[in-house]
Amino acid sequence: MYKKLFLFLVLIKLNLVISSYSYANNQIETLAKYAIVLDYQTNKILLNKNSEELMFPASMSKLMTAYVVFSHLSSNKISLEDTFRVSEKAWKKGGSKMFVEIGKRVSVEDLLRGMIIQSGNDASIVLAEGLFGSEELFSMEMNRFARTLGMNNTNFRNSTGWPDPEHVTTAKDLSLLAISLYKNFPEFMKYYSEKNFTYNDIKQGNRNPLLYKNLGSDGLKTGHTEESGYGLVGSALRNGRRVIIVVNGLKSSKDRSNEAERLIDWSFREFKNYELFDKNDIVFDIPVWLGNKETVPLVLNKKLLLTLNNKQYRNLKLKINYKGPIKAPIKKDTKLATLKIYLDKGEVIEKPLYSNVSIEQLTFIGKLKTKLEYLLFGESIIN
């Protein structure tokens, strides 16, 4: 860490520049009609194909159904041991099933497993009706959560993803939902990595093909209807780094499996996360005028992590902007400068830099001595 920090400080102090930086390379083609691949920690989009175009999510909608249920569990409004009654509507629903029995009461945990692992439409409806009395009211809650998560191009009409011309989302919105699930409800994400679940003496395997490959995958959800094609929201974790992918509009389950696997391998192979500075690492020292210290160290208020390929890391370009010297007194945690990170195509990331210490003004005698030295010898921290 010290060697890395020393290298950055030397390069910055010499010319405040370390060359150029681009995300434009290392792109990959995909058969998916809609796709997005991003890094979980940095939110950096690695692949973007029609990710903001409206599409039908099919059973990937059940991620939001789970989000609503997880929210109620986290706030202790319900427990995993609570039971909900199976309505005739839930029992009769077609498509993938958990095979609950009409009139029976089923635990929330079993219903979650039936929905997540078996993709049961019946389980989804039982959960929706158990929480809000009707699937229609539950859908309103799904949309409320969607707005709070920034899923501004999403509209849910049911809890299952059953075809409806107004039941739409985007690949980008689904990626936001996946990230929010991992961030907000880590204690419940174990269900998405379970490979099978048995209910009512019927054993069904998880429909997520990524779980059966050596990819580090631990979720999330597949979807398919005639209108949507084959889709998948996937996640993989390797050496502490998580990648989220969304693909949809594929022609077959084989294409879905192969494309998702290929995109995950590509994202881990071509990109890595580089920690440039940790929180409170000294990025630069700038001169102080008439202070009891000659310079003030500048720090970031949080870790600076970038997702880059090897070439991009080698050509990284940083610059520090400030108006100096800074006149004392200076309070700790005062914003004094800006760290600029130059990307390709003119994109620039700006991060504020803060004083790491407080600096007091010189006494009257100290000020006088400093000013005299500047007048007599031309030596000053002003440069």
Image: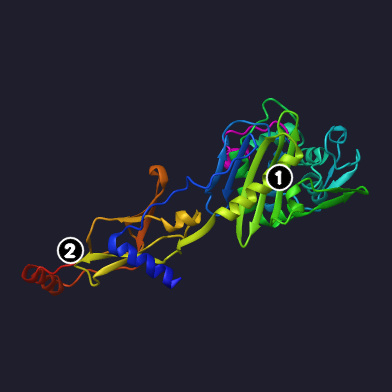
Q: Quadrant of residue 2?
A: bottom left
Q: Which residue is mark 2?
A: 382
Q: Answer above or below: position of 7 versus 33.
A: below
Q: Position of residue 217 (x, y in %)?
A: 70, 54
The kind of secondary structure element at disc 2 is: loop
Q: CA distance from mark 2 to mark 1?
A: 61 Å
State which region is magenta. Answer: 144-160
Would residue 278 be found to the left or right of residue 83 on screen?
left
Q: Which mark is residue 258?
A: 1
Q: Residue 359: image x %, image y %?
A: 28, 68
- What secondary structure predominates along the stretch shown in magenta? loop
Which is more toward the observer, 346 or 218?
A: 346
The question of residue 145 being in magenta is answered with yes
Left or right, 343 with respect to 157, comes to: left
Tell me the quarter of the picture where residue 289 sits: bottom left
Magenta stretch: includes residue 182 = no
Q: Position of residue 151 (x, y in %)?
A: 58, 38
Crowding at label 2, few (<14), some or many (≥20) Cα neighbours within 10 Å?
Answer: few
Three-letter amino acid code at the position of disc 1: Asn
Camera-nearest residue between 154 and 383: 383
Left or right: 379 with respect to 191? Answer: left
Q: Earlier in the sequence, mark 2 or mark 1?
A: 1
Among the 4 quarters of the image, the one containing residue 64: top right
In the displayed orientation, state which residue is furthest to the left. Answer: 376
Q: Is residue 207 visible?
A: yes
Residue at image point 86% right, 39% down: 86
Q: Nearer the viewer, residue 35 or 155?
A: 35
Height in image: 97 above or below 109? above
